[in-house]
Image: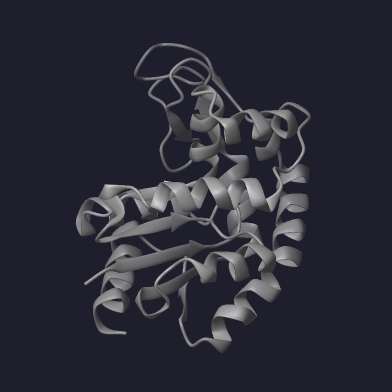
């Protein structure tokens, strides 16, 4: 039976980490629109060329381009038994269009909810290796040597969008876009809200129960 999971949640709620774990356990591909866009640009596809124009300006890629890339991806062979969407759709328009080309009866939407202060603390303490991309957290997963990557010895940096004032603004923007999206899925009785600030194993276990029983 086909399984489709949509993971939603504010920045810092852990969608990517949870998605990776679920992908391993359920043996389903994890689809991130950010990764898809970067891959399309790197491979110089027709859609990638269009997306690149917006990405280079720091603008949002239009819904129709993002949706075309997602639709192409979920038609690939490894998605025949299902897939997991990480943080997509991002707005009501994307949700309504996505709904037209997925198997509705298979969909479950998981909203990882977390307190703003928890999210700010989590993101503002995140550090990334400027060379290999390894991710650390100054409190939860600190490097062995301050500001130095354990894996390659390069310098750790803080992303601009992980700075506290930027994080708070990102959260405001996210809630404005997502509120109607949650209502949309709630009315379809496929929205499940769980705490995103718990232990990874507990979050994943709860989602798997939802996926099997709901």
Camera-nearest residue between 67 and 207? 67
Outermost residue on the top side: it is: 153
Q: Is residue 182 left or right of residue 32?
A: right
Camera-nearest residue between 66 and 204? 66
Q: Is residue 207 left or right of residue 38?
A: left
Which quadrant: the N terminus?
Answer: bottom left
Q: Is residue 7 left or right of residue 211?
A: right
**Residue 4 falls in image quadrant:** bottom left
In this figure, which colouring scheme has been used for the structure? one colour
Image: 156 above or below 54: above
Q: How many marks?
A: 0
Image: 10 above or below 107: above
Outermost residue on the front side: it is: 46
**Residue 116 falls in image quadrant:** bottom right
Q: Position of residue 199 (x, y in %)?
A: 36, 60
Which quadrant: the C terminus?
Answer: bottom left
Q: Position of residue 80 (x, y in %)?
A: 27, 58
Residue at 31%, 63% (x, y): give it.
204
Camera-nearest residue between 91 and 19? 91
Is residue 31 visible to the viewer in this orientation of the structure?
yes
Residue at 52%, 86% (x, y): give it.
188
Residue at 49%, 37% (x, y): give it.
35
Is residue 197 visible to the viewer in this orientation of the structure?
no
Q: Position of residue 119 (x, y in %)?
A: 60, 55
Q: Is residue 27 left or right of residue 175?
A: left
Q: Position of residue 142 (x, y in %)?
A: 43, 33
Residue at 46%, 72% (x, y): give it.
109
């Amino acid at each position: 039976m086909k399984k489709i999971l949509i993971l939603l949640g504010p920045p810092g709620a852990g969608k990517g980490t949870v998605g990776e774990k679920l992908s391993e356990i359920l043996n389903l591909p994890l689809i991130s629109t950010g990764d898809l866009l970067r891959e399309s640009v790197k491979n110089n596809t027709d859609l990638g060329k269009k997306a690149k124009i917006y990405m280079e300006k720091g603008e949002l890629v239009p819904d129709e381009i993002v949706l075309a890339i997602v639709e192409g991806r979920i038609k690939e062979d490894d998605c025949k038994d299902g897939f997991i969407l990480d943080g997509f759709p991002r707005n009501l328009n994307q949700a309504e269009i996505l709904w037209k080309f997925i198997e509705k009866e298979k969909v479950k939407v998981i909203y990882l909810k977390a307190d703003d202060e928890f999210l700010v603390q989590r993101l503002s303490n995140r550090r990334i290796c400027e060379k290999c991309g390894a991710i650390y957290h100054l409190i939860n997963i600190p490097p062995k040597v301050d500001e130095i990557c354990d894996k390659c010895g390069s310098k750790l940096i803080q992303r601009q969008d992980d700075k506290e004032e930027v994080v708070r603004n990102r959260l405001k923007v996210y809630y404005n876009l997502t509120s109607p999206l949650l209502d949309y899925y709630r009315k379809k009785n496929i929205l499940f809200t769980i705490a995103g600030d718990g232990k990874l194993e507990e979050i994943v276990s709860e989602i798997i129960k939802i996926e099997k029983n709901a």
